[in-house]
Image: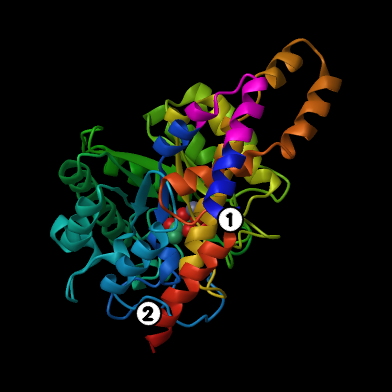
Amino acid sequence: MNRITRIENAWKIAKDYYGDFGVDAEAVLASLEETPISIHCWQGDDVVGFEHDAGGASGGILTTGNYPGRARNAAELRQDLDQAMSMIPGTKRVNLHAIYAETGGGVDRADLAPEHFRAWIEWAQERGIALDFNPTCFSHPNAASGFTLSSRDDDVRAYWIRHVQACRRIAAEFGRVLGKRSLMNIWIPDGFKDIPADRMTARRLLKESLDEILSVPMDPALMRDAVESKLFGIGLESCTVGSHEFYLGYAVKNNVMLTLDSGHFHPTEAISDKISSALLYLDEILLHVSRPVRWDSDHVVILDDELQMIANEIVRCGRDRVNIALDYFDATINRVAAWAVGTRAMQKALCRALLEPPELKRMEAAGDYTGRLILSEEIKSMPWEAVYAWFCLKNDVPAEAAGVLDAVRGYEQNVTSKRT
Ligand code: RNT
Ligand code: ZN
């Protein structure tokens, strides 16, 4: 039997199988198709960016590895993203950071403007994709003290306020030109290596900075602000100014989005459990799906238990209120593969979540925990992969590992291995 016939036959059997469980697999395909995943551009160049003195990420985040072929400029990064996206079915968005501006050199971050992203906007427009955005409040001399929006130095604080405000205007322009709202996520590295004597002042300063930034009204149809909390970073072990409580409170009070990053909590604490709570008090949230291994290591996302739990909660709580973005950076492997594997893993988890038999919730509601356990174990080996393979085939992207690997190897041979 040829490959395509085999995938199609498997899909037909799977559709029939899920039908018996009261699940409409055709509807699942449609839902999967329209669920956007925001792909982070920074996996492609190890969070370096295009500023002329760019030296890699600081602020307690760290990329390790030196796999050859890193994108060295915007044209290469876009080419690599195109290659990755050709291996990813469904609706894609691309997530940019301010350091990916193309200024020709010499433009200060506080003076960035939409024109410095013109090539990105045109590229996105040609592909019909939305752009998300992030101010870059790290890897910069004005962040060298370890404090940005919570700095005690008025000039430093004013500088970063101007930068974030510039970024909000850029995000709004993305939304306007592309006709799709841009999400702008604020993450700052600010924190203390050792035990602080005054946490309150730093947090009050951060609150005041955010208040000033948000005092400029923006059209929510064009852009929306999100704030991302964190537990600790390297060299910032004792206290992070923008902690979970800080931003949860801030988001609820000010009607901005909360960003939950899977690597930003205690190792046994999972963001999957936080989604339902956050959505009782916020209209929407943003996820930074990552994979922490022992710390916030930003490994490539894989189909593990927590990813599945995150996807289940997204589907159960409402896909329209949870915005999915990826956030990881591994420089020890082919970077295009890293994008493809992580994004496809997110989609596979969503596919499985969408295929969940309604019986599971019914059993729980009836107090039948034994039934819930037996069925949830069975769900793990249901033929979801036949549904995902068919989804890939319909979208004209590789359905199986061999296809992904061939595409990655071919691109590496022809393009990235030639970069020196
Ligand atoms: C850092 C945060 C943040 C960054 C990106 C590059 O811990 O997760 O989201 O990873 O902005
Ligand atoms: Zn993040």
* Colouring chosen for the image of the structure: rainbow
Q: In the rendered image of this protein, does residue 364 appear above or below residue 171?
A: above
Question: Residue drawn 51% across and 63% down?
Answer: 404
| Residue bounds of the magenta highlight | 12-28
Query: Is 38 on the left-hand or right-hand side of 242?
Result: left
* Quarter of the figure with the C terminus: bottom left
Question: Residue drawn 66% across and 28% down?
Answer: 17
Count of picture labels: 2
Residue that numbered label 1 is attached to: 301
Q: Where is residue 295 drawn, in percent x and y? A: 66, 60
Is any atom of residue 229 visible in this view? Answer: no
Amino acid type at mark 2: Val
Q: Which mark is residue 415?
A: 2
Residue at the limit of the structure toward the bottom, as seen here: 420
Amino acid type at mark 1: Val
- Density class for disc 2 (Cα within 10 Å; few <14, some 14-19, many ≥20) is some
Residue at the limit of the structure toward the front, as seen here: 1
Q: CA distance from mark 1 to mark 2?
A: 25 Å
Q: Where is residue 348 drawn, in percent x and y? A: 57, 45
Query: Is 180 on the left-hand or right-hand side of 40?
Result: left
Question: Residue drawn 68% across and 60% down?
Answer: 293
What is the secondary structure assignment of the residue under circle 2?
loop
- For the stretch drawn in magenta, the main secondary structure is helix
Q: Is 8 colored magenta in this rendering?
A: no
What is the secondary structure assignment of the residue under circle 1?
loop
Q: In the rendered image of this protein, does residue 356 appear above or below residue 138?
A: above
Residue at the limit of the structure toward the left, as seen here: 115
Name the one closer to the observer, 18 or 64.
18
Judge: label 1 CB < 8 Å from ligand 2: no
